[in-house]
Amino acid sequence: MDTIIGIGLDALAYGMLLFIISIGLSVMMGLMRVINLAHGAFAMVGGYIASYAIRQLGLPYVVAVPTAVAATVVVALPLEFLLFRRIYGGAEPLKQVLMTIGIAFAVIGIVNAVFGPTIKPIPLPGPLHGIVDIASHTMAVHRLVLIVAGLVIAAGLWLAVEKSNFGVRLRAAVDNPDMAAALGIRTDRLYLVTFGIAVALAAFGGIAGAELMPIEPTYALRYMVTFLVVVSVGGAGSTTGALVASLIIGLVDTAGRYLFPSYGMFFTYAAVILIVELAPNGLARRSA
Amino acid sequence: MSAVTARPSPLRGDFIKLAAVALAGLAALVLFPNDLGLMTRIASSAFLVVSLDLVTGYAGIATLGQAALFGLGAYAAANANLAGLGEPILMVAVGGLAGAVAGLIFGAVVLRSRGLAQLVLTIALVQLVHEAANKLSDITGGSDGLSGIDVAPILGAFRFDLYGRTGFVFALVLLLATLAVLSVIVRSPFGLKLRAIGRDPGRVRTLGAAVMPALLVTFTLSGAVAGMGGAIEAISTGVVGLDSVSFERSAMALVMLVLGGSGSLYGAVAGTAVFMGLESIISAANPFHWLIIVGVLLIVVVLFVPRGLTSLAGDVRRLLAIFGLRRDKR
């Protein structure tokens, strides 16, 4: 019983982290129809900047995190109108894969040249360091915060997509970009904003999840596979789909590590193949 | 217009390119006698990239999991060797057979979906094989790699030497033979159908041709080629590491293919040779600078040279023809 609760809590924290990082990827895939293999690189860059801001510049955690998120967005936005904009639309997936993997390679190389090849820790402030008791099971506070942050982001995105004016435009552009543009929706601006939000969420996830996914140069490719898996299992562009998929992957992966540690991620990938075979369009087909 | 007689036979063009590969190989043998290990790895990797070209360049299916077939061929050949099979040609046959079976299964799983789901399936498959290889250390050696491969002389006559000369010539001859067979296949009606499927599978289906069986055959063929490459690498290096079934290796193969020019067998070979040659020089200085160069090169190629760097040769020829410096054959 104790093991089950332990697995459940860890799986929840890990799943929420996957959700925070992957949801931006999912929305970009649903809206701009682009397979972005550089998404993990944005999470990594966020982590590097945060680590640098705290350890070298001595900024307090609460200041460093938003600064790092903002800095990552500032660095990434030029890529949107220089590079990403040219590969939007689902016509040439190979082109998208190659360009974005190229961006990921370049970011890995640059980050390593600037910061070096070692793992960069992101020191947590005192209050996040502690341990709390949940159902007679101890849990690190920062994991609890991760779960709460994931829930807040999920709720915020759901409200933004379903209830706001922005969400109406977004859903219109997902359903039919040409018609949306013809009706006066500035789709290029919409894409830019969505890209910015996706990068910001990735960067935040990279920082908040540094305990579970350590920040080092190969981060960008090492975890990219997991993020892609979440999106394809959840269905591109679906918030609830991504949430459910993140929790499933988090659960399968955590349970596998607890119960059959020597198998690595074997069961995770087996589950992914099974789910994708059964539901090729993802668990939730509905867009954004 | 004596178009019929003036036009060189397409097979002649293939023969020239094949001869060029053979000459380049022989030149490497003479010019880089101390780097034959690298040259052999280039030849075995060329099998992987060419096999990827069949699936991606010709049949139009993007995969990031091709190394699974390569690695399974390597493991099969190595295990056959450890079980007592010494003859390298038979080991390559075992690798090719294992790759073909794996390719058929791989294709059957992957072809059920399209787009992102398909790409993720290819990644999940290679990762699944990787995790399984890590776990099944009895037959794969796990993360230490499978070593102890002891190869007999080829046909009982050509012993593998310390400098890797025999290994390289062995790999080169097999590569040339494979390329010769594949150039006939891609020019055959089947090859043309494959190109058509790559362009627009829906239209091919509408025309009444069976798409699915053709793709399964392609995956099987591609698996055989990749498996042979894996076996050759196992024979020449004497070990099979976990990296031979990795996502990274698959992604790099795709990069080599695209830089060289997908949809052309010789573009795939040229891409492999140039990429791995430069990699060994630049990575020796700093592996991460190499990553930056590859990344930027990929972006540039995707934006400006979509048909790959070998297509630039054709552009130069056309440019020369425009300026009257060279008589255009057509």
Image (cartoon, coloured by chain):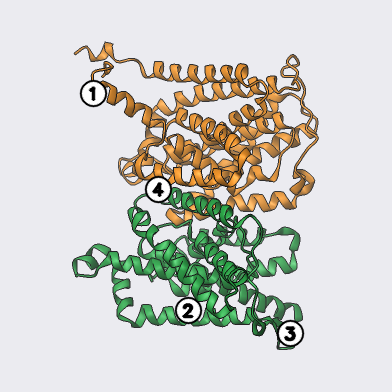
The outermost residue toward the front is A57
The residue lying at 55 percent from left, 47 percent from top is: B65
Instruction: Report helix, strand or loop for mark 2.
Output: helix
- Vertical side of A195 occupied by B202: above or below: above
Instruction: Report helix, strand or loop for mark 4.
Output: helix
- Nearest to N terminus: mark 3 or mark 2: 3
- Nearest to N terminus: mark 4 or mark 3: 4
Chain bearing tag 1 is B
Which shade is chain A?
green
Which residue is under mark 4?
A: A95
**Closer to us: A231 or B167:** B167
Q: What amino acid does circle 1 point to?
A: Ile
Which residue is under mark 2?
A: A154
Which x, y percent locates residue B320?
28, 22
- Vertical side of B30 occupied by B262: above or below: below
**Separation (CA) of disc 3 from disc 2:** 26 Å
Which residue is under mark 3?
A: A137
Q: What amino acid does circle 2 point to?
A: Ala
Which x, y percent locates residue B213?
46, 40
Confirm or deny contact between disc 3 and disc 1 (CB under 8 A): no
Which x, y percent locates residue A105?
52, 50
Which residue is under mark 1?
A: B322
Confirm or deny contact between disc 4 and disc 2 (CB under 8 A): no
Q: What amino acid does circle 4 point to?
A: Lys
Chain bearing tag 3 is A
Instruction: Say if residue A284 shows up in the picture.
Output: yes
The residue lying at 47 percent from left, 49 percent from top is: A102
Which x, y percent locates residue B288?
58, 47
